[in-house]
Image (spheres, helix red, strand yellow):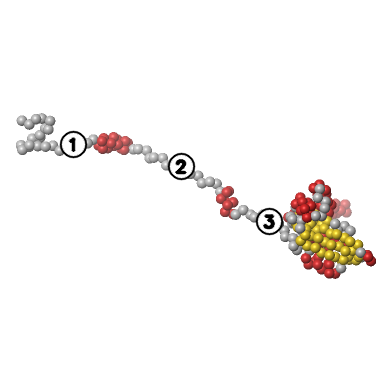
Amino acid sequence: MREAWLTRTGRTLAVVLAVAMAASACGGAQVRGEEANRPRVAIVGLKKVAAVRERVEEIAGRRFEIISEAEYRAAARRLKARKMTRRHVAKVAAHLGAVAVVHARVKKRRRGRQQVTVVVRDGESGKVIESYKLTVRRGTIARSGRRALDQRLLTSVEPPPPPEPEPAEATAAAEAPAPEEPAPEAAPPESDADADRAPDEAGAEEEAPLPPVQVDESGQAIDDEMPPL
């Protein structure tokens, strides 16, 4: 009895585990599909300031798919566009399909403070569209800089417009089959009466009417070809 109970319990646990794994896989696939449909943003140059990097990634991840720094650097090497200039950034962003690139410059100051300048560049033109100066001390962003990031970071970046759907009327007209032309109607067969009557009617139309008969005083017909007596 105990062995049978253990066998049934093991089977039940196996079924529950399989269902849970399938649900998890479906949920992960759905999340990946949603992320793939979101616009992409690259984040570069924030490895040395973990607090700023984590905050920027958290804010960007709400609306965008994040391109890692390793992926950006690899593409920049292939394209020979390693500088964070307008032309190089636009070239790499176009290759990666990024709508914006976030990068930073870090300067160290005394007493353990860091001056971090976060720059947001437009992915199409490479122009600077946002800039933030932050002060980081002992791994913490100053309150004013943190508030600026929370309120305005990537607000100037507009996602690309979705493709316009084709008009329903044009689609329906293209899919509808061409109307078939009606076949010409066959002439009705001639009946025997029409066939018999047709030659007589044709002959009657072709024959000229007879001239009127002239008579003399005695009532006899006058022949025009005969000379008078």
Q: Which quadrant does the C terminus fall into?
A: top left
Q: What is the secondary structure assignment of the residue under circle 3?
A: loop
**Residue 51 appears at what percent x and percent y?**
87, 62
Find disc 2 in the rendering and name its residue.
183
- Using the image, determine if residue 149 lies above or below residue 180: below
**Mark 1 touching mark 3, by CB under 8 A?**
no
88 and 25: which one is in front? 88
Q: Secondary structure at mark 2?
A: loop
- Callout 1: SS: loop
Q: In which quadrant of the rendered view does residue 168 lie?
A: bottom right
Q: Tell me which residue sits at (75%, 52%) in the image.
A: 94
- Residue drawn at (88%, 65%), measured in percent from left and top? 136
90 relative position to 228: left or right: right
Residue 185 shown left or right of residue 137 in the figure = left
Q: What kind of residue is marked 2?
A: Ala
Indicate which label's residue lies in the foreground, 3 or 2: 3
Q: Position of residue 53 (x, y in %)?
A: 85, 60
- Total marks in image: 3
Q: Residues within 10 Å of mark 2 (few under 14, many from 20)?
A: few
Question: Which amino acid does the dot numbered 3 rest on?
Answer: Pro
In-image side of 24 versus 192 (left or right) = right
x, y percent for residue 165: 63, 54
- Answer yes or no: is residue 23 visible: no
Q: What's the mark number on residue 162?
A: 3
Q: Mark 1 highlights which residue?
A: 210
Q: Earlier in the sequence, mark 3 or mark 2?
A: 3
